[in-house]
Image (cartoon, rainbow, N blue to C red):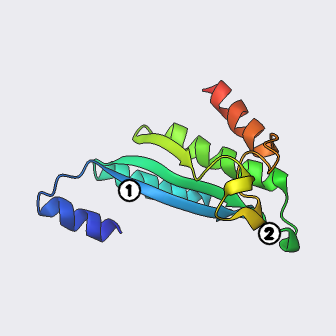
Amino acid sequence: MFAMLQSLKDRDVPLDGVGFQMHLYADFDLFDEVESNFQKAADMDLNVYITELDVSIREEEGETEEQQAEVYKRVLDICLRQPRCKGMQTWGFTDQYSWRRSLNPLYLDRAYQVKPAYTAVQQRLSEN
């Protein structure tokens, strides 16, 4: 991806940002890689946008809502610490209508009740 971005920039294609689709699982732990990739984009003078974030829970793997909340919080934290990260957008807000519905990936459950992920994101935003 970065080679493609550089190729576009080398050909003077107007490019000022890059979006990251992040369809993750609750056991995700490659936060250093996310931070590094955001920095690579920033070093290319590109803004960073998280355009599709959801964190699925595989119950059969023992994943929990608390793990999901931690992933949301840590991804948000990386974005907030990167000056070129301009926004974080989730791929919906309730599990009821998610394209990954069976994996309960979003902030609100199917009855629109707050999950730990919602609280974790609100807490992290209140610290900023």
Image coords of residue 29 (percent x, y): 68, 62
- The residue at the point 60 percent across, 26 percent down is 128
Label disc, if present, on residue 57 of the rendered structure:
none
Q: Which mark is residue 58?
A: 2
Please name the residue that numbered disc 1 is placed on: 40
Against 12, residue 77 (above or below) is: above
What residue do we see at 87% from left, 74% from top? 60
Residue type at mark 2?
Arg
Decide if residue 92 is on the left or right side of residue 38. Answer: right
Q: Quadrant of residue 24?
A: bottom right
Residue in the foreground of this view, choosing between 41 and 120: 120
Q: Position of residue 52 (x, y in %)?
A: 53, 55
Secondary structure category for the residue under label 2: loop
Residue at the image point whose x is 69% and y is 53% from the top: 71
- Residue at the extreme left: 11
Q: CA distance from mark 1 to mark 2?
A: 31 Å
Please state if 89 lies on the left or on the right of 65 as rendered.
left
Pick whichever, 95 or 66, lies toward us: 95
Instruction: Indicate which disc, 1 or 2, sits on the residue closer to the N terminus.
Output: 1
Q: Are the residues tagged 1 and 2 within 8 Å (C-beta)? A: no
